[in-house]
Image (spheres, helix red, strand yellow):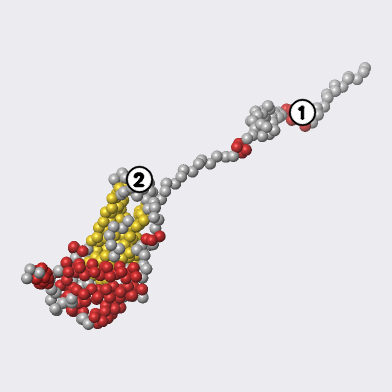
Amino acid sequence: MNSCRPTLFLLLAALLLVACKPTIPGKYIQPDDLEDILYDYHIADGVSAVMGHHDDTLQMNIFKKSVLAKHGYTEQQFDSSMAYYIRHAELMHKIYESLEKRIESEADAMGVASSDFNVGSLSASGDTTNIWPGERTMILSQQPAFNLYAFELKADTSYHAGDRFIFSCDAQFVFKDGSRNAVMLLAVRLGNDSIVTRTCHMSSTMRHKLEYADTDRLGVKSVSGYIFLARNMSDEAEVKSASLRMLVLSNLSLIKMHTPEPEPQPEQQLPADSVKTDSAAAPPAQAVRPTSTVKPTQMPQTPAQPTTRELKLHAAPQKKLVTPLPPAK
């Protein structure tokens, strides 16, 4: 009889756990089915982006309706189920967590690197390494509890003055409607306690990247940042809407690259031969003062004009007056 008591106790505990587990009303899509639908939405959205239909709302709606038809649900059933799960955020979060792992496993199976750099090829000495602290794949929704992911890393001995940081991720907006608006931020606290930030706004499905390099070689005390999925609070209909709006972030990475301090360049000097003087060469010419001076130019003197009397004398020679002698007697 005593041997049956442990078995009975375990059976009662199992029944208690089953009784306490929250059940989803039958009129709503069950968690496993909803995860499959959201996963296929993720695939359909990626296909539409590759085909160039990402901005074509009509084409995207066709893709998503085909997903619902594949799983045997209508658009009304999906919308009402999303509204239920959004009201029960903890259930929605569990679905997102499972979906994150599924997407990450898919990426690993396809051999997708976690960043622009192949993590396996990064330097083992720590000169270049991926210091990302969280999961490589995550999903953000517009619910206040799940619309933000933030991180902060304190610098250790592997950080050096002049380090360069690259924060990057692949963003995929799986939205049925509404505005797409997310913010990505990288903040670096330097050795003098000043903070430098880099920011970008994300609104399309593509890879986003932020970079900062400690070019002044001040040293780094900490690196932090966040990704925030915003909601248009001025649009009351969008605020109250329970439509599908999720941001899938994949290949998240934070690369730290060490750049060694440049060696000082020696001053360039002229060769010794170029500064020697030729002993046979003539000494440099010196300015010589001229020994002669230039006489001032003298104006020619104008001869004096002759008087009227002189003109007359020159004009005709004068006749001598001869006095006749008296006749002889």
Q: Residues within 10 Å of mark 2 (few under 14, many from 20)?
A: some
| Residue 155 at least partly seen | yes
Q: Position of residue 80 (x, y in %)?
A: 16, 76
324 and 197: which is toward the camera: 197
Q: Nearer the viewer, residue 222 or 131?
A: 131
What's the residue at 23%, 61% (across, down)? 148
Residue at the spot 28% in from the left edge and 56% down from the top edge? 225
Q: Specify the farthest residue to the top.
A: 329
Which residue does the numbered mark 1 point to in the structure image? 313
Is residue 59 left or right of 316 when viewed as pictured?
Answer: left
Numbered mark located on residue 247 in the image: none
Q: Nearer the viewer, residue 86 or 195?
A: 86
- The type of residue carrying mark 1 is Leu
Image mark count: 2
Please give the name of the residue rendered at 24% of the width and 69% of the height, measured from the top-left corner: 98
Q: Quadrant of the N terminus?
A: bottom left
Q: Residue 218, which numbered label?
A: 2
289 or 26: which is nearer to us? 26
C-alpha distance separating marks 1 and 2: 113 Å
Q: Is residue 8 above or below residue 189?
A: below
User: Where's residue 77, x and y in %?
Assistant: 18, 79
Residue at the extreme left: 1
Q: Earlier in the sequence, mark 1 or mark 2?
A: 2
Q: Amino acid at mark 2?
A: Leu
